[in-house]
Image (cartoon, rainbow, N blue to C red):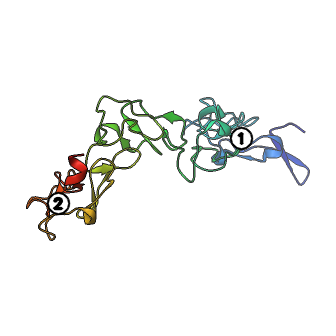
Amino acid sequence: MKMTQQAFWGFLTECVESVEYGPGCGGTCSARKCKEAGSPCPRDTGRCDGGCQPGWKGVDCTSECSHTYGDGCKKNCSSRHCNGTPSSTCDHVTGACDHGCSAGWKDVDCVTECTLNVNYGPGCHGNCSARKCKDVMGTCPRDTGRCDGGCQPGWEGVDCTLECTLNVNYGPGCHGNCSARKCKDVMGTCPRDTGRCDGGCQPGWEGVDCTLGMLQCHM
């Protein structure tokens, strides 16, 4: 019996052109994942002349990539930088990371590194230019965006993108405590950058934020 034939009641019948193919005509032309939609479907192999769609392999493009993904199954699942436990298996088409990317990487499959001094963090969503670093010329690490020299007054966080809480804390790194100031006007505001007491200090206290005792200042 020829490869492209099937038996019906003792008779040999050729595979239906553009419908079925292969041994016993067991292959279905419409089930192939050919890159070219109009690719011919030879009765013997079902070969996709233009290659396979991403995530598929084989002469007839009916086998999923295994431990690999994408166009030609050339990308390794284990080479991705996904958030969480590394895995050697993944979506055979996109290689998508279900829980996003590790810090410093982006794209669906997390294989593209953040651009140095441009963006940072998981998915590269952090904007280096939006940080409030004390050293405005400092580097912007791809993973954290860390401001090594600390933050400008009124800002906090590793990457100095969190504003101090109004009337709660203030100053570089938001280390100033608004309630610890000795302002003459106890109901006055507490600016995030300086904690300045606009109405002056209570007796015995000095400084923009009225946190320095006079005895301490003049020792």
Judge left or right: residue 129 versus residue 80. left
Left or right of residue 105, residue 197 in this image: left
88 and 12: which one is in front? 88
**In terms of image quadrants, where is residue 36?**
top right
Q: Is residue 164 above or below residue 94?
A: below
Secondary structure of the residue carrying tag 2 is: loop
Q: Nearer the viewer, residue 197 or 165?
A: 197
Please provide percent x and percent y for residue 190: 19, 61
Q: How many discs appear?
A: 2
Inter-mark Cα distance, 1 to 2: 72 Å
Residue 23 lies, in percent from the top left, at 83, 41
- Crowd rating for badge 1 (residues with CA inside 10 Å; few <14, some 14–19, many 20+): some
Instruction: Point out residue 80 in the picture as x, y percentages from the top left corner.
Output: 60, 39
The crowding category of the residue bearing disc 2, from other C-alpha atoms within 10 Å (few below 14, some 14 to 19, many at least 20), is few
- Left or right side of 123 for 214: left
Question: Which type of secondary structure does the marked residue at label 1 adopt?
Answer: loop
**Which is closer to the viewer, label 1 or label 2?**
2
Q: Amino acid at mark 1?
A: His
Pick whichever of labels 1 and 2 is earlier in the sequence. Answer: 1
Q: Going 24% across and 46% down the picture, which residue do you hit?
A: 219
Q: Which residue is mark 1?
A: 67
Query: Is 30 drawn above or below residue 54 in the view shown?
Result: below
Residue at the spot of label 2: 204
| For the residues bearing labels 1 and 2, Cβ distance under 8 angstroms | no
The amino acid sitting under disc 2 is Gly
Q: Residue drawn 40% across and 36% down?
A: 148
